[in-house]
Image: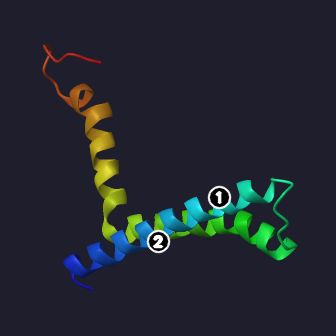
Amino acid sequence: MRRKSAMLVGNGLMGAGMILMVASIAVSVLNQLPQITMPALMANGGIMGIFVGALLWLAGARMGGHEEISDRYWWHRRFDARCRKDQNARYH
């Protein structure tokens, strides 16, 4: 897959995962209201949807390349100043 199409598919998966998680949380909250009666399958599906949405989000981040970029910035923020041999480097 080309980089551009991989990024589009990854962003699409991340968006689908976010929508699924928010909708599942809404179903789970509505299930707790006594006025609304939902079938047990729909109530359990709301909880399962949160986890499936999180997996879609992570798969999209991995495919779109967002995971590697955040790791690289994390490394630079934490260890770049400490790895230098410059005596005047300021630590945070």
Query: Crowding near pointer 2: few (<14 within 10 Å), some, many (20+)?
Result: some
Q: Quadrant of residue 35?
A: bottom right
Give the residue number, with chain letter if any, for mark 1: 26
Q: Which comes sooner in the sequence, label 2 or label 1?
A: 2
Quarter the C terminus occupies: top left
Say whether residue 34 is left or right of residue 58: right
Residue 13 lies, with reference to residue 65, above or below; the image says: below
Residue 17 lies, with reference to residue 88, above or below; the image says: below
Point out residue 74 in the picture as x, y percentages from the top left corner. Answer: 33, 41
Checking the image for residue 61, the label placed there is: none
The amino acid pointed to by label 2 is Ala
The amino acid pointed to by label 1 is Ala
Residue 18 lies, with reference to residue 33, above or below; the image says: below
Point out residue 47 in the picture as x, y percentages from the top left corner. Answer: 73, 63
Residue pushed farthest front? 35
In whole angstroms, how far apart are the C-alphas of marks 2 and 1?
A: 15 Å
Closer to us: 32 or 84: 32
Secondary element at tag 2: helix
Say whether residue 77 is left or right of residue 14: left
Give the number of the mark in front: 2 or 1.
1
| Residue at (25% x, 81% y) in the render | 5
Give the residue number, with chain letter if any, for mark 2: 16
| Residue at (79% x, 67% y) in the render | 43
Closer to us: 72 or 59: 59
Q: Quadrant of residue 79?
A: top left
Closer to us: 31 or 58: 31
| Residue at (22% x, 83% y) in the render | 2
Residue pushed farthest bottom? 1
Query: Crowding near pointer 1: few (<14 within 10 Å), some, many (20+)?
Result: few
Closer to us: 37 or 66: 37
| Residue at (16% x, 18% y) in the render | 89
